[in-house]
Image (cartoon, helix red, strand yellow):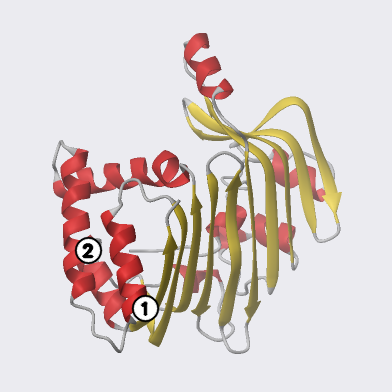
Amino acid sequence: MRVSLLLPLFIFLVPFSAAAAGTPCSDLIEGSAVIQHRDGFTISDLHDGCAVTNGLFKSGSRMGWTFDRAEFKGDGLVDFVKAIAAKPDHLPTWGRFSVEGVRFTPMLDNAMANYITTVQQWPMDMSGAFRFDPKDGYLDIQELQLTNLRLGEASVSAELNLPKNAGTSALTQEGSVSLAHLRFRLDNMGLLEGMAMPSLAAFLQQLTGSDDPAQGISQLRDTSVTALQALPDNRIDAESKKALLRFVQDLPHPTGFFTLDLAFDKPLPIGTLGLDAAQLAQTALASAKISVSYRAR
C-alpha cells in the first residue's frame, strides 16, 4: 500500500496543467485543473506561501468543496509543489495550511437537490502543520484538525521516521516510512456519523463483498471487541481498555469526547501491511502502548 504523507498539505494544488503567466502563486493555482473560481475569487502571494479566497475544489465530475479562504505556507513550498512531478530529492523542512468555510458542494443536474444539500450544512474549518528534520528523518505532523460548530471536532497528530535526507521518492517506497507515535482526538456531535462512517461502510462493503453495510460494521465491532479483550495489561491499563471497549461498542453512534494515544515500542512500518482490517488492527495494537479516554454525553 503506497502512501504520500504530505498529500493532505498539497491537496489543493494538484494536478497541474500549463501554468498561466503572473505571480508565482497565480502561476501555481491557475494551472491547477481542480481549483475553480467562485464570485470574488482571488489569489494572493504570501511570505513563503499563497492564499486563495472564494474557490471551489473539484473532487469529482459531480461533486466539490467550496471554501472561503485557504492559505498554505512552507519552506520553499511553491517551488517544491511545482516540481513535485519530478520527485525532488528533498522535502520541505516545515509547512502549514488552513482552510476556512469549507462546504460540500454537489454539482448535480438538479437545482433543488444542490440547494438542499448546501443549505443544510454548517461550514467546516481545517488546518494542519508539519516539521521535518532531514538530518535524522524525523517528521512531526502537528494537529491535522477539522472543526464544525454543529458536528464537533477531530484532530490527528503523528510522529514518523523517514530515511535521513529523504526526498519525495521515499514517500512511495514500501517500508521506508514508519510510525512512532499517533494521537487522535474526537469531540463527536455527529462528525463521525456524517463523514467517517459512510466512508468506512463503503470500504467494508468493498472489502467483504456484503450488500449490507450494517452487517459489515457489526462484524468490525465484534472483531475489535475480541481483539481488545485479548490485549495484555502491559499494553493497556484497565481504565483505557474499558473506555476503548465502550467506544467501539457505541459504534456507529459514539458521542462525546474520545482520545486515543498509541506509542510504538518499535516504529511501525507503513505500507507493508495488508488491507485486512483485523490484521491491521492486530499488528498495530500488538506493538503499541495504548492510552484511551472516552466521556460520552
Asked if the residue under mark 1 is in contact with the one under mark 2, i.e. CB atoms within 8 Å, the reply is no
Q: Nearer the viewer, residue 30 or 18?
A: 30
Q: In which quadrant will I find the N terminus?
A: bottom left
Q: Find numbered disc 2 in the image and state the secondary structure of the residue it sits on.
A: helix
**Residue 267 versus residue 83 in the image, above or below:** below
Residue at label 2?
224
- Left of 213 or right of it: where is 94? right
**Residue 251 versus residue 58 in the image, above or below:** below
Identity of the residue drawn at 47% across and 15% down: 113
- Left of 218 or right of it: where is 251? right
Question: Which comes sooner in the sequence, label 2 or label 1?
Answer: 2
Identity of the residue drawn at 46% across and 42% down: 190
| Front of the two marks 2 and 1 | 2
Q: Amino acid at mark 1?
A: Pro
Residue at label 1?
269
For the question of whether residue 204 can be seen, the reply is yes
Q: Find numbered disc 1 in the image and state the secondary structure of the residue it sits on.
A: strand
Identity of the residue drawn at 69% across and 70% down: 94
